[in-house]
Image (cartoon, rainbow, N blue to C red):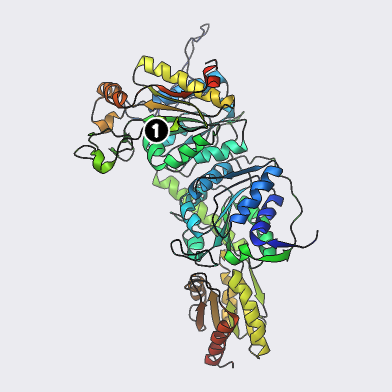
Amino acid sequence: MTLIKTEIPEGMEPIYSYPESLTRLSTHYCPGCVHGIVHRLIAEVLDELGVRENTIGVAPVGCSVLIYNYINTDFVGASHGRAPAMATGIKRIYPDKVVFTYQGDGDIAAIGTAEIIHAANRGELITTVAINNAIYGMTGGQMAPTTLPGMVTTSTPTGRDCAVAGYPVKLSEILAQTAGAVYITRESATDIVGIRKTKKAIKRAFLAQIHGLGFACVEVLATCPTNWNLDPWEAMQWSREHLGGFYPVETFKMTDEVKALKV
Amino acid sequence: MTEQLLKGNVAFAEAAVRNGLRAYFGYPITPQSEALEHLSGRMIEEGRVFLQAESEIAAINMVYGAACTGVRVMTSTSGPGLALMAEGLSYIAGSEVPVVVVNMMRGGPGLGNIQPSQADYNFMTKSAGHGDFHPLVLAPASIQEIIDMVGLAFELAEKYRTLVMIAGDGSIGQMMESAELPPMQPVRDTVPEWAVSGAKGREPNVVTSLYLGAEKLEALNLRLQAKLAEIKRNETRSVEVATEDADLLLVAYGTAGRICVSVLREARRQGLNVGLFRPQTLWPYPEERLSELADQVKGMLVVEMSAGQMLEDVQRVVQGRVPIRFHGRMGGAIPMVDEILVDAESLAKEIGQW
């Protein structure tokens, strides 16, 4: 992998720099994929909160399985969908450390549905970042729980027929109903405004954990240009239009304590 | 310390607390639920972690997460629950984290029933999950022995950074016996250097079972196999009763092994030179000693609460040197002394010893 170097000339102050919580590796993600963007947002948040050395991440199964190559904290690798259970085990041992899971939509809204709902319902003091691109990226573009009605994938070649394959799962709406969740929001990381909002949401979600308020999850509408057969620019537009059209970008639950956090 | 009357499930759970268990995650399943109930009170009393998970799948992954921090952690279950845990067991083996799992075997397949069984022998010793690995499997035959094996299980799990399973059965879990618990040990407060704890002043630690590239994954497998070979060399355990002059050898473990002690006494009373070989480790199987005994005795009778799963290991070791007969009960039925004796007598006649 390519090593990226940032050198600051003598006598100059950096106004924008590489986050300490991000390793200096270039990612393996496809052009136009937003995993790299969201990784960076998490890294910036960990830097700003000063918790990098106190953080343990839980990696999923999916395209972001190698997230520990990019985020510069301790990490464990979960089996498919079980990241919230693993995070629970870690957090119960280390209540004072920051524990987060990073999961794709297949991981969190299909195979791992039970684990995320129960972790949220227990009010587990962990933070979850869920990437929703409506498709299984790593296995080659099959239908995800979040695949839109009529959407063509390699396992719905004539488009998702909901009468046969079931309906798209709106995870955030479901999690918002759990008593233990304090902050459930859906953001979109496909344009500058959305990326800035996503970062703020991630920061709020980590702060909710650090202040011991309860479970927080940020769902991020994303892209998969490779499996959508679109170029990066088209994919960003498609995500905003179609994913955003089906999955409203909004905050579904935010307790008063979370609202009062200074982000 | 004094002996007290203890139920098996409570005994092993309390033994774990006294061996410095830091966290327990579990899901209720008969015939081991008393362990979870006992720990739900005791762990909180001691300021440690107890959590009832939403499934055995979640339980084993909570165990896996806690194990990545290097603490003493365990779960307990029975066959149907163990099947759900198989995914996690494989990840635990691949990640080389120390974990102890107690399986109180019940009748199967399927929902089966809740009576004692030994039908998870192959599952535990040979195929606890996908990929090439074996857990170290300990088999107690009494309440005292399961108490002692809990301490041993934690030691071995940590020494080898491996998965250790205790193969009990419904009767070990449910029966009460007089036994002595170990003294209370504090929870260990040191963190192993490989564990995750936050990368303060060091490079990040990553605990994973993912090794992309055949060379890397083969290297992990070679390391695992070398470790298993070392476990095989050092940790094989068995007990023997009256084998010195035995012509006919009973081979049985756990509850079946315990029943065979009564068979042996009765057979000896009738003038049969019967001995008992009882493996305490099912993996690694005590091959070397059994092989020596195969050169000494004239026949073997394997007794199991299964269709004959350990039997195949005995046949593998004995290699046809002496006749082997099998007495098995299934589905929660327990072998009876009288019935085993009939088979022992008939084998004795066959080998000309009676």
Residue B286 found in image quarter: bottom right
Q: What is the three-letter code of the residue carrying label 1?
A: Leu
Residue at the spot x=40%, y=38% of the render? A107
Q: Helix, strand or loop at disc 1? A: helix
In the displayed structure, B22 sits above or below B30; it is: above
Residue A261 image offset from top left, x and y in percent? 55, 17
Which residue is the site of mark 1?
A171
Choose between A55 and A176: the one closer to the eye. Answer: A176
Would residue B245 be visible to someone looking at this image?
no
Choose between B213 and B137: the one closer to the eye. Answer: B137
Chain at numbered mark 1 = A
Q: Is residue A157 left or right of residue A7?
A: left
User: Hey, which residue is sitting farthest right in the picture?
Assistant: B1
Would residue B347 be visible to someone looking at this image?
yes
If the image is split into quadrants, where does the N terminus of chain B sit?
Answer: bottom right
Residue A161 found in image quarter: top left
Q: Is residue A103 left or right of residue A48?
A: left
In the displayed structure, B19 sits above or below A243; it is: below
If the image is split into quadrants, where does the C terminus of chain B sit?
Answer: bottom right
Choose between A242 and A248: the one closer to the eye. Answer: A248
